[in-house]
Image (spheres, grey):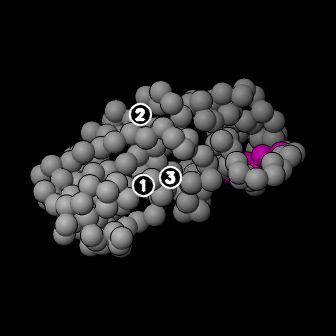
């Protein structure tokens, strides 16, 4: 059944299908409008990234009553930013004309850095955070060094496994001597 069926028939199974977390922008216009509004929400911990860039935004759809449903997945269970993100999504959708909004947090499948967009990775680099290298799924490459996002040097060292958040490690570049966060592959 196509993604637009849930808006015209009100079929609960179709809505559930449309809300399956995929991280792919829906094609049905009203659902896409809900996605686009939610995609404007910035991550409160890394404000240069949207929740779409980060891969937290997993699905959006509207039911026959006009309720906008948005599915998000935290970067890790217990992430303190999720309450703020949920409220910011409600505000963004309200501002976009959606009078009723339901935000659902889904923990399974667990978020992975594989869901981060290439645009998001570039934004991290420009912001001074080394983006994750490699992929969490499949064979794991052994990383010999992390590239400094400021000068590009591979002459870096890990200072601490946990940086400003659990998903980042603190590194220092031995060339330019600047400290920087590295977004770990999760």
Q: What range of the chain is rendered magenta?
A: 145-150
Is 118 on the left or on the right of 148, as rendered?
left
The disc placed on residue 20 is 1
Image point 34% across, 42% down: which residue? 104
Mark 1: which secondary structure?
loop
Q: Tell whether position 29 is magenta.
A: no
Q: Separation of disc 3 and disc 2 at Cα?
A: 14 Å
The disc placed on residue 81 is 2
Above or below, comparing residue 24 to residue 41 in the picture = below
Image point 24% across, 60% down: which residue? 11
Magenta stretch, main secondary structure, is loop
Q: Which residue is mark 3?
A: 55
Is 65 on the left or on the right of 153, as rendered?
left
Within the image, what quadrant is residue 166 found in? top right
Mark 2: which secondary structure?
loop
Q: Residue 150: image x %, image y %?
A: 68, 51
Image marks 3 and 2: residues in contact by CB distance under 8 Å:
no
Question: Closer to the camera, 16 or 38?
Answer: 16
Is 20 on the left or on the right of 152, as rendered?
left
Image point 81% across, 48% down: which residue? 140
Image marks 1 and 3: residues in contact by CB distance under 8 Å:
no
Give the mark, 1 or 3, whose residue is nearer the N terminus.
1
Within the image, what quadrant is residue 33 found in? bottom left
Give the mark, 3 or 2, whose residue is nearer the N terminus.
3
Look at the image and tell me in which quarter the C terminus lies: top right
Question: Closer to the camera, 113 or 168?
Answer: 113
Q: Separation of disc 1 and disc 3 at Cα?
A: 14 Å
Badge 1: residue crowd in 10 Å (few <14, some 14–19, many ≥20): some
Q: Residue 149: image x %, image y %?
A: 68, 51
Above or below, comparing residue 6 to residue 164 in the picture = below
């Amino acid at each position: 059944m196509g993604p637009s069926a849930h808006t015209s028939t009100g079929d609960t199974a179709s809505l559930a299908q449309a809300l399956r977390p995929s991280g792919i922008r829906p094609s049905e216009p009203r659902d896409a409008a809900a996605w686009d509004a939610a995609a404007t929400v910035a991550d409160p911990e890394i404000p240069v990234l949207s929740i779409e860039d980060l891969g937290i935004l997993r699905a959006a759809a509207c039911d026959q009553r006009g309720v906008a449903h948005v599915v998000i997945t935290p970067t890790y269970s217990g992430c303190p930013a999720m309450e703020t993100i949920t409220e910011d999504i409600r505000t963004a959708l309200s501002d976009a004309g959606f009078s009723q909004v339901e935000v659902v947090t889904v923990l399974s499948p667990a978020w992975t850095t594989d869901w981060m967009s290439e645009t998001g990775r570039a934004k991290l680099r420009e912001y001074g955070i080394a983006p994750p290298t490699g992929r969490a799924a499949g064979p794991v490459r052994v990383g010999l060094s992390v590239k400094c996002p400021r000068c590009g040097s591979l002459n870096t060292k890990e200072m601490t496994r946990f940086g400003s958040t659990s998903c980042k490690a603190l590194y220092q570049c031995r060339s330019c001597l600047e400290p920087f966060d590295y977004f770990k592959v999760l």
